[in-house]
Amino acid sequence: MELNYSALDRPEILLFLFHPRKEVGAHPTRADQLEISIPVEEGVRICGRLHIAAKHLPVILFFHGNGEIVADYDDLAPLFTGMGINFFPVDYRGYGRSNGFPTVTALLRDSHVILKDAKQQLAANGFTGPLIIMGRSLGSAPALEIAAGHPQDIDGLIIESGFAHAVPLLKRIGVDVAGLGIREDHEIGNLSKIALFDKPTLIIHAEFDHIIPFADGRELFNACPSPFKTFLKIQGADHNSIFEYGMQSYLQAIRNLLEKWM
């Protein structure tokens, strides 16, 4: 894809924006999991792990938050498969078992390749259920890139702790936005992207999110034109305590979104 976010790809920004971490140790082969490797360009592969419920059931292709890796979701995946959802988290360049180096341009460009390859591998392995794209925090960017670029290829969208505005977020995480000459037109465009998606959508946001304000979640919800959209506010939670404060309502909201396919 001809995407160019080079204004945001400078080392002074990437240092704050990405915190890649490798998966350590061997992962045992399990019958209810499928290891996925996706070539995104020559010599670079993105890895994911498909946690299997049943092949006719919905699949959630999940883009995680910063500092997280696919392996972090091994313990949470049974909550999804137990509800009848195939849960498919993928990493970014430099994260988990994936190689390469993360940049904003690569993050968004890779999302198109990941979607295409994931759909092919799911079909080749006999998965026939609907495909839902989900992004948490940083992962809201590739999720919304897909939603805007490939609405015909996906059936629904879930955004958890997603950001509406990239430039204020960069300021909050320590980037010298003014000194680097970052302007509003350097935005990633999450708001304009969600405005192009009119299929079933769920927005989840913590009441006291200290990294991505609650207002960002509301803006994303309001900008979404879908007649089938839901907003879930997790009372009392901050950016990293959503499951602690609202696990049941979080999971129920996802189940409600997917109910017609289950």
Image (cartoon, helix red, strand yellow):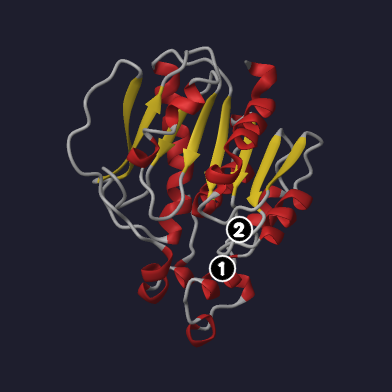
In the rendered view, tell whether residue 66 sits above or below residue 59.
below
Q: Residue furthest bottom?
A: 179
Which secondary structure, mark 1?
Answer: helix
Q: Position of residue 23 (x, y in %)?
A: 25, 44
Circle 1 residue: 169
Residue 91 is drawn in which quadrant? top left
- Front residue of 221 and 210: 210
Label 1 Cα neighbours within 10 Å, binned few <14 / some 14-19 / many ≥20: some
In the rendered view, tell whether residue 25 sits above or below residue 60.
below
Question: How many callouts does the rendering have?
Answer: 2
How much space separates mark 1 and mark 2, taking CA atoms?
A: 8 Å
Is there any visible trace of residue 114 in the rendered image? yes
The circle drawn on residue 214 is none
From the viewer's perspective, tell me whether residue 129 is left or right of residue 155: left
- Front residue of 25 and 59: 25
| Residue that appears at 77% across and 39% down | 226
Query: Disc 1 marks which amino acid?
Result: Leu
Given contact means CB atoms under 8 Å apart, are the residues at marks 1 and 2 in contact?
yes
| Residue that appears at 56% across and 36% down | 133
**Sequence-first tag of 1 and 2:** 2
Is there any visible trace of residue 186 in the rendered image? no
From the viewer's perspective, tell me whether residue 229 is left or right of residue 58: right
Q: Position of residue 99 (x, y in %)?
A: 26, 49
| Residue that appears at 53% across and 53% down | 137
Query: Disc 2 marks which amino acid?
Result: Phe
Residue 12 is drawn in which quadrant? bottom left
Circle 2 residue: 163
- Front residue of 260 and 210: 210
Q: Residue furthest right?
A: 227
Residue 117 is drawn in which quadrant? top left
